[in-house]
Image (spheres, rainbow, N blue to C red):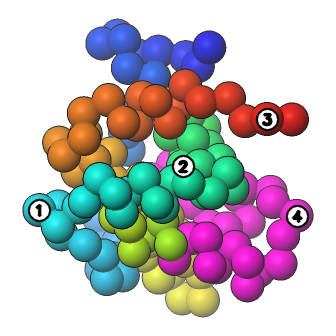
Amino acid sequence: MPPTTDTGSTIGKAFPEPAGAPEPLPEPAIEDLRLETVLAGLSDPLRLTIVRKLLLESAQFDHPCGWFGFDRPKSSLTHHFKALREAGITRQRQYGLERRSHVRVDDLNARFPGLLDLVAAWTPQA
């Protein structure tokens, strides 16, 4: 069972946006988030793992691809991170040559209450 917060939520602590952070890459506005699009973005086990890891193990505001420790080609990871961003699940920022990601927790909780708790509670198959 994932750790819980004082409110019973399984979502980890939110980190404030750092001052001077680059503008986010293009993403859907909160009012344009659609449940079917978000669920399609989460339908791949690797993407679900990415979101779960960001929710439960984040140590800072956002993380680069290398933080996840996946043994996958960079092109494959780029595809998955782009799919998450375009579905409105994550927000990405470009820091020089590096893209860093975090989950749009507030936006997703506002549109689809409880969805991220389900993702955090999910157990990947071995």
Q: Secondary structure at mark 1?
A: helix
Q: Where does the N terminus fall, quadrant-wise?
A: top right
Pointer 2: residues within 10 angstroms few (<14), some, or many (20+)? many
Sequence-wise first label, 1 or 4: 1
Please, what is the three-letter code of the amino acid marked with disc 2?
Val
Q: Which residue is mark 2?
A: 51
Please, what is the three-letter code of the amino acid marked with disc 3?
Gln
Sequence-wise first label, 4 or 2: 2
Q: Residue at x 61, y 70 (%)?
A: 80
Q: Nearer the viewer, residue 59 or 37?
A: 37
Mark 1 and mark 4: Cα distance apart in space:
35 Å
Q: Is residue 74 above or below residue 66?
A: below
Pointer 4: residues within 10 angstroms few (<14), some, or many (20+)? few
Mark 4 and mark 3: Cα distance apart in space:
17 Å
For residue 125, the mark is 3
Q: Residue at x 42, y 70 (%)?
A: 85
Sequence-wise first label, 2 or 1: 1
Please, what is the three-letter code of the amino acid marked with disc 1?
Glu
Mark 2 or 3, closer to the camera: 3
Q: Residue at x 32, y 29 (%)?
A: 114
Q: Nearer the viewer, residue 53 or 31?
A: 31
Q: Is residue 53 above or below residue 21?
A: above
Answer whether labels 4 and 2 touch (C-beta < 8 Å): no
Mark 4 and mark 2: Cα distance apart in space:
17 Å
Q: Where does the C terminus fall, quadrant-wise?
A: top right
Q: What's drawn in magenta, residue-wise? A: 60-82
Q: Which residue is mark 1?
A: 31
Please, what is the three-letter code of the amino acid marked with disc 4?
Asp
Sequence-wise first label, 2 or 3: 2
Q: Secondary structure at mark 3?
A: loop
Q: Which residue is mark 4?
A: 71
